[in-house]
Image (cartoon, rainbow, N blue to C red):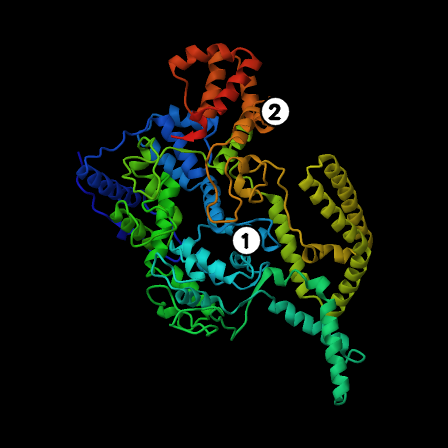
Amino acid sequence: MITARPILILLAITSTSIAKKQPLAVITNAAAEIDYLIEEANTQNNIAPNSILEDSIFLRRAYLNITGRIPTYEESKNFLDSSAKDKRAKLIEQLTYSPGFNSHLFNFYANLLRLKTNQEQFGLGWHVWLRDAVKTNQGYDTIVNKMLSATGHCSTNPAVGYYLRDRGMLLDNISNTSKVFLGTQIGCAQCHDDPFEDWTQKQYYQLAAFGSEISYNSEIVRKKVKEVVEYKVRKDGGKPTRQLTKNELKERIKLSKNEARDLNSIFRNFNRNSINLQSGKKLTLPADYKYNDAKPKDVVTPNVLFGSMPTSAADSDKHQQMADWITSPSNPMFSKVIVNRLWKHALGYGLVEPVDNWTDRSNIAHEEVIDILVQILHTSDFDVRETLRVIYHTKLFQREACDFEITDGRIHDFRGPLLRRMSSEELYDSLITLAKGNIDNLINEDQLKKWANFQSSIQQLVSASPQEIIKLDNQADIVEDALREPQNEAKKLRAEKDKAIQEGDTQREKQLSSKLKRLYEKMNDIKKAKQSEQMEEMSMVMQYNLRTKDNILLRASEMPQPFKPGSLPRDFGGSDRETTNAQHTHASIPQALTMLNGKQIDNLITQQSRIGKMLKSFHRENDRLNVLFLSIYNSYPTSEEEIMLKQYSRSKQEIYILAKAMLNSKRFLFVQ
């Protein structure tokens, strides 16, 4: 039976420049409105809602869906032992404003944006910047606008990582931008008019023309190189006192080009990690353009796909105009797409599927719910946290999961969320929780230190005097000359190693790997011997590598991403970050072997791990069984389970076997 429809009081949400936590009554009222709309529609179709979950399953779902990990032994015990009537609402409130929420949401963004921490030098900065944007609860529109309008060097504006991710591939980037932020796939129109939708090739190029002025070079470096070159070509360090002859002028220009080229050893990575807007740069239609609405190689005038440009952006550069149009509250697709993605993030399936391909033929489940979520998003200044908070407070979030599969973009009636397997990051973070407890507050100090040092080095370099730059350049030339021979040797060895791999000659591959390792060590010794102290401080600027450690136990959001092939997160479907949301939860044989025989699982149940120490500290069989169940399943064992499993709690060996069996069960690997 449906209760009376609640009166929506979203207007009580105060719109401010900085999103604020809203009163719980406002949030629960909006959640009740969503429940009403879904249940009313389902009743008309004779669909009954699923039952409300028992406490232990709700507890586990809340932690996994909100924070991306299972609760600890203590967190499970405290919740299950509580008799408070409002303990579920309190738990949602606690988790939604916890560091664990930030970690889980960062993974959501990183998979969406295809973020690669170790890509060039900008990847680390983009990772650190995005993680901080989530932590400080920046509005979704603000985050996206900053990325889409970003210019400059990554050290001063890490948001340029969004464009540098697809460096030199403007047309591909614009296709991805439309898919990610507008849920509109226009990729086919890059080469020809879309045969299935209304998008034309000209429209594609018109949207791309907003980015036509993007150049992958550094204005700061151009000015610095000019300053240094002018200093070097002046006679006696001063300006010429007479008019130069034509031949003298030619020689000066020639010398200037050579000098500028020579500075490449100092500034070579700047252009790979910078964006500059080149005024007047145009985009033209392809030479093989075949439609009668324009001619091949015609200059393209920027134009939006739908709607109109906000009047506030009229005087902005084209780069900023596209950012403002996409993120405008008046752009319906921007808001609808993100609330649909958030709905799927919380409940396992979108109100519209696929989430990144909305068309006139898309099936929309409960369209009024999307409207409510968009209203929540707008009145909270695009606060993703507050929008998810509403979804988590619905009765729907507390209902039993649907154990059937939905495919081919069919609509889900949402009598309950969908049963699903843990994502790779959720599994990784849950195993870390079993090993170390709640480490949500731990941050990757190595990443922060390396990025801060890099930023400092960049600032020192761009503010250095011409004399200091010349000295660094001379020292860099010395190092390059000393490394040239071993670098050529390393190139040959890598080619031989690749050949050995292709031929399946593992013995030869190992020999070559050992030679390469010794050669790299020799090259590092040469660098240390040839570099001055000042040049060593600048090494991160001049070198390519800003990689950070990945052999530490921290949450996935604090680790370099994507994880390496062969690692546990990648084996369990972690994204390679080549395409948007490339992660999956399909089962595989490597997964089974990892869970049965992998060192991560074996290490987890030794006496050195947190769960291992707890098992050792308890002597009663029932207490040991409680430790296993509250830590792994986040529930107390039933009386039947106590009777059946008590015998396996008596010895160290047997209880470790039981723990491994529990970790391999569907009850652990699935989110019910």
Q: Nearer the viewer, residue 45 or 637?
A: 45
CA distance for labels 2 and 1: 35 Å
Q: Is residue 306 above or below residue 603?
A: below
**Left or right of 598, for residue 407:** left
Say what secondary structure mark 2 lies in. Answer: loop
Q: Position of residue 148 (x, y in %)?
A: 47, 60
Instruction: Give the left or right position of residue 616, taking residue 366 as reference.
Output: right
Point out the image quarter for the N terminus.
Answer: top left
10 Å crowding of disc 2: few (<14), some (14-19), many (20+): few
| Percent position of residue 460, x then y | 68, 61
Badge number at residue 126: 1
Which residue lies under the disc numbered 2? Answer: 608
Residue 444 in percent (x, y) is at 59, 43
Q: Quadrant of residue 503?
A: top right
Q: Is residue 214 above or below residue 60?
A: below
Residue type at the position of mark 1:
Trp
Residue 65 numbered mark, or none: none
Which corner quadrant of the image does residue 166 belong to? bottom right
Nearest the viewer among 90 and 273 is 273
Instruction: Label 1, secondary structure: give it.
Output: helix
Image vertical order of residue 388 relative to residue 294, above or below: above
Q: Are marks 2 and 1 in contact (CB under 8 Å)?
A: no
| Left or right of 461 on screen, residue 326 | left
Q: Residue 485: which quarter of the image? A: bottom right
| Viewer can see residue 407 | yes
Viewer-proximal residue among 394 and 477:
477
The disc labelled 2 sits on which kind of residue? Answer: Gln
Q: Position of residue 311 (x, y in %)?
A: 35, 70
Whichever of callouts 2 and 1 sits on the residue coming sooner in the sequence is 1
